[in-house]
Image (cartoon, rainbow, N blue to C red):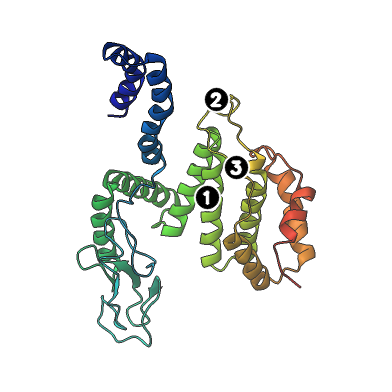
Amino acid sequence: MDTIILLIIIFSYFAVPIFAKKIGKNPILYFALSLFIGPLAFIPLVLKRHKTPTPEFKVTGPFIENVKPGLDSAASPVIDARVAACPSCGAVLKKIPGSKTKCPHCNKFLFIRTDSKSNSRIVVNAGQAETIDEEWAKINGSWEELQIQKNRFAQAKSDLTAKFGTAASDGDVNWRLLNEDLIQHSSMQNWGHYRNTVFQMGEQLRKEGKFAASLEKFLLVCYIDICGPNNISTPLGKKHEYGQEPFSKKSSFLAPGVTKRIEKSAIKAKFDIKKLREMFYKLEEEYKQAIPFTQSAEKSWGKLKSEISLP
């Protein structure tokens, strides 16, 4: 439509003088008038191009955390339907669970999930949690990926059980899988994914009460973040065809969630700022063969120290 209007405007510059001559009028005068009036036709086009588009939808109501993809958070707010009761043995609990925990009566794990059908947060057992996770995976289109991960976990558990001669714990299986992920991410120079995997290791250690060990992982996460990790999916030793670098200054950052974990784990492990610095400096030597750090530990520590509050 815009093209047609433009062609009409251009054509009028030539047609107006010819028409004026045929009716006995001064063609030069009419041509001059067309030069003055013609540009006015461009005004609707300019206004159309600069008009603010009407949004396809409006977000109303308060933001609701922990809403699973696939549901409209405004139209379907999550309902808190948790109760202080164990879904496995039915025993009454002292308080409503807020996250994964163990029932003090039957010693089975309790999980918190959002049911995809009722859109409500509920307390469930391991089997129910797995069913709900699969339902969400189907909704999100990640069901096949979930099955791959489940099969991978089962195979790792079988291998470790055969190696140990006794049933491998979920923690041991997770640790093996995380180490495999580290190798895969580093081999393809996906340092952002590598960093996330190191963080998962730190979280596992923290939840197991191994605070000193978790500190090392969280400090390593910060060291990588300061260097500015990128995911370039290119075999180690080769340059990306578009010139993307494994690490870059523009990608450098420090996550407050990680620095807070460092502070809490340091207090639990009875680390002061001096001991924390010593551990951080050792990372450069310990991981230099695995990670191509772009900044020295000394320079990186200066940035990290300013974000940590410890006695």
For residue 90, above or below residue 7: below
- Indicate which disc, 2 or 3, sits on the residue closer to the N terminus: 3
Look at the image and tell me in which quarter the N terminus lies: top left
- Counting from the top left corner in percent of width and height, residue 88 is at 26, 75
Q: Residue visible at 36% across and 32% down?
A: 41
Residue 242: which numbered mark, if any?
A: 2
For residue 226, above or below residue 79: above
Residue of label 1: 196
Q: Nearer the viewer, mark 1 or mark 3?
A: 3
Q: Check disc 3: other Cα within 10 Å, few if <14, some if 14-19, many if 20+.
A: many
Can residue 169 be seen at all in this image of the molecule?
no
Can residue 284 be seen at all in this image of the molecule?
yes
- Indicate which disc, 1 or 2, sits on the residue closer to the N terminus: 1
Q: Check disc 1: other Cα within 10 Å, few if <14, some if 14-19, many if 20+.
A: few
Q: Residue visible at 31% across and 29% down?
A: 2
In the shown orientation, is residue 30 left or right of residue 234? left
Look at the image and tell me in which quarter the C terminus lies: bottom right
Distance CA(mark 1)–CA(mark 2): 24 Å
Q: Secondary structure at mark 1?
A: helix
Q: Residue furthest toward the front?
A: 24
User: What is the count of numbered marks?
Assistant: 3
Residue 229: which numbered mark, if any?
A: 3
Q: Residue visible at 26% across and 15% down?
A: 23
